[in-house]
Image: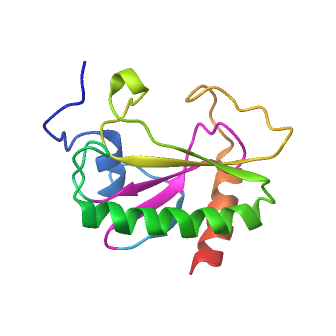
Amino acid sequence: MTIPKQYDDENIIAMIIRGEIPNHTVYEDGQILAFMDIMPQSYGHLLVVTKAQAVSLLDVKPDDLAYLIKKVQTIAQTMETYFKAEGILLRQFNGEAAGQTIFHLHFHLIPVKQDTKLKGHGLEMADADSLAKQAADLKALLS
């Protein structure tokens, strides 16, 4: 399967944006949404998504991408401090062959430390109370 040319507004991220699926929101404005990944690869893993209907990096409007990446940077800086991270891993996939499983443009921000061993992507659910606390703390720092 190649990258879909048509946006599917029933993908899970679109449903989260519309409020049909609950999430642990870290930041939201008219153009983006950032929320905790419920199956994190490390403590503090979150997603930053555009609210624009974009399948991938290859079809997003440049102005939407510029705004999104500015917010990705701001959120990453806040995460680095809050999680006492030694680094922030940024992941973004375009097309099934590249590992994209949800066809809505999104960035993964994953705090890491030297001794961090990342979990497999989407393998283990995180504790909901822990996600809620992380989200609330980050939200307060970003407001």
Q: Quadrant of the C terminus?
A: bottom right
Q: Residue furthest left?
A: 6
Report x, y in % for residue 60.
24, 52
Task: Report which quarter residue 141 is drawn in.
Answer: bottom right
Left or right of 123 on screen, residue 106: left
48 to the left or right of 52: right
Q: Quadrant of residue 11?
A: top left
Q: Nearer the viewer, residue 56 or 10?
A: 56
Q: Residue at x 37, y 21 (%)?
A: 97
Q: Residue at x 68, y 69 (%)?
A: 137
The residue lying furthest to the bottom in this view is 143
Residue at image position (51%, 56%) is: 35
Q: Front-most of 32 and 57? A: 57
Could one spot residue 32 in this view of the protein?
no
Query: Would residue 88 be visible to someone looking at this image?
Result: yes
| Residue at the far top in the pictured view | 1
Which residues are drawn in magenta?
30-51
Q: Quadrant of the N terminus?
A: top left
Side of 98 where 139 appears, left or right:
right
Residue plotted at (60% across, 25% down): 123
Asked if the stretch drawn in magenta spans residue 133, the answer is no
